[in-house]
Image (cartoon, rainbow, N blue to C red):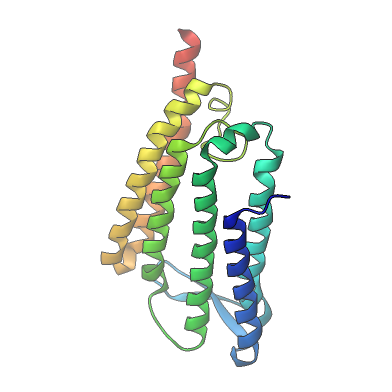
Amino acid sequence: MNIRKNEIIISAIILTSFLIGIYLYPYMPDKIASHWNYRGEVDGYITKFWGLFLMPSISLGLLLLFILIPRIDPLKENIEKFRKYFDRFIVLIIIFLFYLYLLTIFWNLGKKFNMVQLLVPAFALIFYYAGILVENAKRNWFIGIRTPWTLSSENVWDKTHKIGGKLFKGAGTIAILGIFFQNYAIFFVITPAILVAIYTVIYSYFIYQKEKNN
């Protein structure tokens, strides 16, 4: 099996996460803050074990999924056409989860800060790069804006992803503004992303109908 450079990087990050969890286990409180509301206030706790090892376990599961997808997709030859963008996105997602993991640990070690504000730039980066990935994605069953209409037509796929990529980059640009609005930062992140998702689904339907009627 061919081991790609990104898989090695991700594996190293995940291993580091598990080692951090093992090392810090004796020093962490029995209940770990694990969820924050839109104002950055803690509103959920989990046990120490899951607080330290849930995120690394999720990252490991995602790694296995990301390795599997390009190998089982019926249109895997199309994935290879934009594989470099997909690989970079995978690494970015795992780094994001590692960053969230470190923030959670620091918070529970007594370093208080506004969690939402510190996550806003990370979300903005994820959305912006998702736009780059979407713009370059070729038709496949797992990656991109997958609706019945984009999967049914190469032309609808290309047009939807072209505009969807621009919109996701716009959503990332808007999200970064949340840094300046502490109490409403999460809305700058969530609202544009939801609107982009809704718009691209509707857009793909109408483009398909237009193509079908021509």
Please state the total of marks drawn on the protein image.
Answer: 0
> Does 120 sit left or right of 48 as displayed?
left
Image coordinates for residue 141, horizontal then vertical, percent: 62, 35
Image coordinates for residue 62, horizontal then vertical, percent: 64, 57
Q: Residue at x 58, y 81 (%)?
A: 32
Image coordinates for residue 74, horizontal then vertical, percent: 69, 32
Q: Which residue is nearer to you in this view: 157 or 199?
A: 157
Q: Examine the rendered structure and indicate whether residue 23 appears above or below residue 142.
A: below
Q: Residue at x 36, y 40 (%)?
A: 167
Q: Examine the rendered structure and indicate whether residue 118 appears above or below residue 82.
A: below
Q: Examine the rendered structure and indicate whether residue 30 appears above or below residue 131.
A: below
> Does 193 sit left or right of 7 as displayed?
left
Which residue in the rendered view is the most extreme toward the right?
Answer: 1
Image coordinates for residue 185, horizontal then vertical, percent: 34, 63
Q: Residue at x 45, y 7 (%)?
A: 214
Q: Which residue is nearer to you in this view: 44 or 160?
A: 160
Q: Residue at x 41, y 53 (%)?
A: 190
> Does 144 sit left or right of 26 as displayed?
left
Which residue in the rendered view is the most extreme toward the top?
Answer: 214
